[in-house]
Image (cartoon, rainbow, N blue to C red):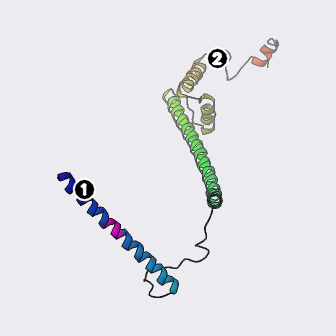
Amino acid sequence: MENLDAMKERLDREAAEAQARKQETKDFYETLSTAAKGENLPDDFEPVSEAEGRVFTQDQVNDIVRGRLAKEREKYGTAAAALSEKVTEYESSLVEREQRLKASENRYEAKKMLAERGLLTDHDMLNDTILDIVIGGDVEETTSNIFTLQLYMQAPKEFPVENQSIDPVRIAMGLEKMKL
């Protein structure tokens, strides 16, 4: 019995839904016939023009979509290329700035090491030349170069610098017996 009651309720629901769909269809056709006659049109009714009401084949739709996509890709492709170029320029400028900063830091560290070892002079041009000589690719190379410079500066000189009685060039040429 319960099954019969459940079936009856289901059939009644389906019948009511079918009646509602039938009424909607009837209302739709009435609106269409009214629109065709131009009588009593609803406020939100917008007629379809012949161009908008045209029927397209799938191939025509595909061609239209391809054309629009191509235009959009072209439009944004150019913008993307320009943006990519700007990003590349910006990245290269960042690399240059980073290299200049690293060189400045290396120069500062080398100057600090030279000052600690007492190898700087009172002449800025000479200090710049010394810095150009000792600065290496990294801190270890710079430290090694400074150490070598320090050893050189502390090494005893074979010939006196002032009042030199023997010319080292003459000695190198085998003319050591001649005096200046």
Residue 138, horizontal then vertical, whole percent: 55, 28
Tell which of 171 and 135 is nearer to you: 135
Residue 173, horizontal then vertical, whole percent: 82, 14
Which stretch did the figure color magenta?
A: 16-20
Is 59 located above or below residue 49 in the figure?
above
Badge 2 element? loop
Q: Look at the image and tell me whether residue 85 can be seen.
A: yes
Residue 108, horizontal then vertical, whole percent: 52, 36
Tell which of 43 and 128 is nearer to you: 43
Q: Residues within 10 Å of mark 2 (few under 14, many from 20)?
A: few
Marks 2 and 1, the one that precedes in the sequence: 1
The circle on residue 157 is: 2
The circle on residue 117 is: none
Badge 1 element? helix
Magenta stretch: includes residue 129: no
Is 161 located above or below residue 175 in the figure?
below
Which residue type does callout 1 highlight?
Answer: Met
The circle on residue 7 is: 1
The outermost residue toward the bottom is 39
Q: Quadrant of residue 54?
A: bottom right
Q: CA distance from mark 2 to mark 1?
A: 120 Å
Which residue type does callout 2 highlight?
Answer: Lys
Q: How many marks?
A: 2
Q: Principal SS element in the magenta part?
A: helix
Is 65 located above or below residue 172 in the figure?
below
Name the residue: 50% across, 29% down.
Answer: 113
Name the residue: 49% across, 79% down.
Answer: 46
Q: Residues within 10 Å of mark 1 (few under 14, many from 20)?
A: few
